[in-house]
Amino acid sequence: MVLAFAAAAAIGWFVIFRARRKPPGPAGRSEVPREEPEAWETPTVRTAPPPVARPAPRPAAVPAGEGLGGRIRSLFRAGPTEETWEGLEEALIRADVGAKAAAALVSRVRERYRPPMDPAEIVSSEVVGMFGADAPWTPPVGQPGVVMVVGVNGTGKTTTIGKLANLLRHEGKKVSLAASDTFRAGAGEQLDTWSNRAGAHLVAGQRGADPGAVAFDAVQAARARGSDVLVVDTAGRLHTRQPLMDELRKIRRVLEKASGRPVDEVLLVLDATTGQNGIVQARAFAEAVGVTGVVLTKMDGTARGGIVLAVREELGVPVKLVGTGEGIGDLELFDPQSFAARLVR
Ligand SMILES: Nc1nc2c(ncn2[C@@H]2O[C@H](COP(=O)(O)OP(=O)(O)O)[C@@H](O)[C@H]2O)c(=O)[nH]1
Ligand SMILES: [Mg+2]
């Protein structure tokens, strides 16, 4: 009876949880079928009745099955057999790292692992190795250096631009922002608020204005004011449809024409909770406008962002920055060590 009640409560909670987590549905977002991250599939863990007292306290290690690390350790418990390696590959794929990165990781771990090593630690250090040679983020240099920010609606482009402007200001740079998302209602106002907070200069047009024209004006205004960096916000609707990609290509062309030099950086913003769909997004934007780096947002939640390993391996695009909240200071330089530790935790 008690058990039945607990199960019903758990299911009820699960349904409410899923309903609450559904994105509110800005137009562009509904186009992208979201893979539900693992954490959404196992919320019942939080409502399970307290376990009966154990005869002996468990060690502080992650319980098997909870995180990737726990899963890896339990796979290796019976010594590495062919099944262990298959299981490891499967566990990595389930953590969104992609088939290519998973296969590469398995073969590297296979070479290095010798019992009684901790297999999770070996995986973690090989993950670090995959990002090993990537250069960390540095602000572009130019008069101004130009950073274009692209990505699907809701991933955190505008918020990231606000945080990035703040970061650059703290490094003593003069920053201009271009509101080239003229499509979405309120996008210009949102960027205006961020520019005020960060102490950056904003160039915006009317809603529906030509995003290329805004970009062109922004380069001229940034140059006239002596800004060190210009960061350009863009629309993110329907990344699978051609018009957005055409628009982004045009913005890039206009920026390069106005500044007389190549765009320094095209940052793709990926939401860590997106899962497998992130690689589809990354491929589409990379093909259309070229992408020089990824900003992985929403890493303050339960998501682990395994998808950036897939993007790194399959498209060769490094991760530059990590968003860890909605506040102006919640942007960090990507650190492979802490990323790997969190992924394999
Ligand atoms: N928790 C969290 N929320 C974020 C982060 N970055 C952005 N957001 C939120 O994600 C939502 C969409 O952000 P926005 O910048 O408007 O996305 P855009 O459509 O890509 O420009 C907003 O509610 C932001 O506050 C992050 O790193 N962590
Ligand atoms: Mg936006």
Image (cartoon, rainbow, N blue to C red):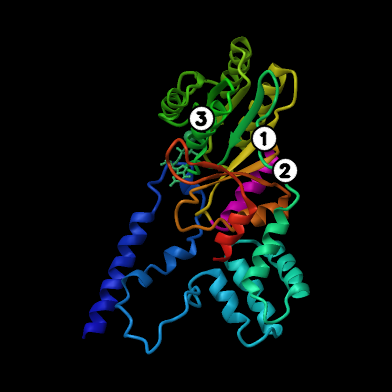
Residue located 48% across and 76% down the image: 63
Report x, y in % for residue 161: 53, 33
Label 2 SS: loop
**Which residue is label 2 attached to?**
135
Label 1 SS: loop
Label 3 SS: helix
User: Mark 2 touching mark 1, by CB under 8 A?
Assistant: yes
- If you read the primary sequence from the N terminus, does the residue marked by circle 1 or circle 3 appear first? 1
Quadrant for residue 39, please give it.
Answer: bottom left
Residues under labels 1 and 3: Cα distance?
14 Å
**Which residue is label 3 attached to?**
166
Report x, y in % for residue 272: 53, 52
The answer to whether residue 46 is left or right of residue 289 is left
Q: What quarter of the picture does the C terminus occupy?
A: bottom right
- Disc 3 marks a residue whose amino acid type is Asn
- Disc 1 marks a residue whose amino acid type is Thr
Residues under labels 3 and 2: Cα distance?
22 Å
The answer to whether residue 326 is left or right of residue 68 is left
Residues under labels 2 and 1: Cα distance?
8 Å
Q: What quarter of the picture does the N terminus occupy?
A: bottom left
Residue located 61% across and 41% down the image: 268
Judge the density around disc 1: few (<14), some (14-19), many (≥20) Cα neighbours within 10 Å: few
**Which residue is label 1 attached to?**
138
Residue located 33% across and 55% down the image: 20
Report x, y in % for residue 75: 60, 81
Q: Which residues are magenta?
A: 275-288
Nearer to the camera, 264 or 163:
163
Judge the density around disc 2: few (<14), some (14-19), many (≥20) Cα neighbours within 10 Å: few
Quadrant for residue 248, please give it.
Answer: top right
Residue 221 covered by magenta stretch: no
Residue found at the very far top of the displayed protein: 224
